[in-house]
Image (cartoon, helix red, strand yellow):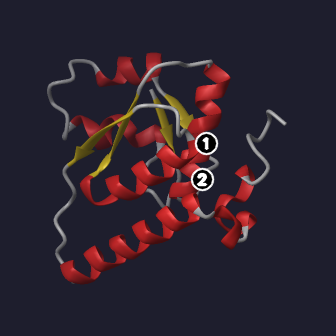
């Protein structure tokens, strides 16, 4: 399993991952052992487009074939799916949305912001020449860091 976007902004830290997610996933018998065995961390991506490129790099490094399971929050799924589908257009991607934390403050504002981000991601993926790639793709602008 690959977890991209591991950084403070995303609220995911490898050292706290087991504690953070074991309460939400009580049916996983030994999450600590599973994480030690089978999880790789992607710490370079800072946004959804970079997460997609980071995942593409991981797929290439591993020489993986077949479908990919995309796990993210319900609110983020459309944007993540648009970005990953644009990066890996020939790959079948299975979306697996997980429940979001409740929107306690300004739920309509949050939904509107998510929609605007989705539209921006969709346009950036479909019409890439209208944006400054460095601004959106950062370390992944020229391809996979460390693989060039």
State the residue position of label 1: 54
Residue 44, percent from left and from top: 64, 48
Q: Nearer the viewer, residue 107 or 126?
A: 126
**Which picture quadrant has residue 137?**
bottom right
Residue 27 is marked as none
SS category of the residue bearing label 2: helix
CB under 8 Å between callouts 2 and 1?
Answer: yes
Q: Residues within 10 Å of mark 1 (few under 14, many from 20)?
A: many
Q: Residue at x 72, y 64 (%)?
A: 133
Residue 123's place in the image compared with 139, above or below, is below
Q: Residue at x 34, y 56 (%)?
A: 78
**Which picture quadrant has residue 132?**
bottom right
Residue 81, percent from left and from top: 40, 49
Residue 111's place in the image compared with 138, above or below, is below
Q: Nearer the viewer, residue 85 or 37?
A: 85
Residue 141, percent from left and from top: 75, 54
Q: Residue at x 52, y 67 (%)?
A: 123
Q: Is residue 33 visible?
A: yes
**Which picture quadrant has residue 62?**
top right
Residue 99's place in the image compared with 133, above or below, is above
132 with respect to 17 (left or right): right
Residue 50 is marked as 2
Q: Residue at x 61, y 31 (%)?
A: 58
Residue 63, percent from left and from top: 62, 18
Residue 29's place in the image compared with 8, above or below, is above
19 with respect to 88 (left or right): left
15 with respect to 25 (left or right): right
State the separation of the CA atoms marked 2 and 1: 6 Å
Q: Is residue 5 visible?
A: no
Q: Nearer the viewer, residue 108 or 95?
A: 95
């Amino acid at each position: 399993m690959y977890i991209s976007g591991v950084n403070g902004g995303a609220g995911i830290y490898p050292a706290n991952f087991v504690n953070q997610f074991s309460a939400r996933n009580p049916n996983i018998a030994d999450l600590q052992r599973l994480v030690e065995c089978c999880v790789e961390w992607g710490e370079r991506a800072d946004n959804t487009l970079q997460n997609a490129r980071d995942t593409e790099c991981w797929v290439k490094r591993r020489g993986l074939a077949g479908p990919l399971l995309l796990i993210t929050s319900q609110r983020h799924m459309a944007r993540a799916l648009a970005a990953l589908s644009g990066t890996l257009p020939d790959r079948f991607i299975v979306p697996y949305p997980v429940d979001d934390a409740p929107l306690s403050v300004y739920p309509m504002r949050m939904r509107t912001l998510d929609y605007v981000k989705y539209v921006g991601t969709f346009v950036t993926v479909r019409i890439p020449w209208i944006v400054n790639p460095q601004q959106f793709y950062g370390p992944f602008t020229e391809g996979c860091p460390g693989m060039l």
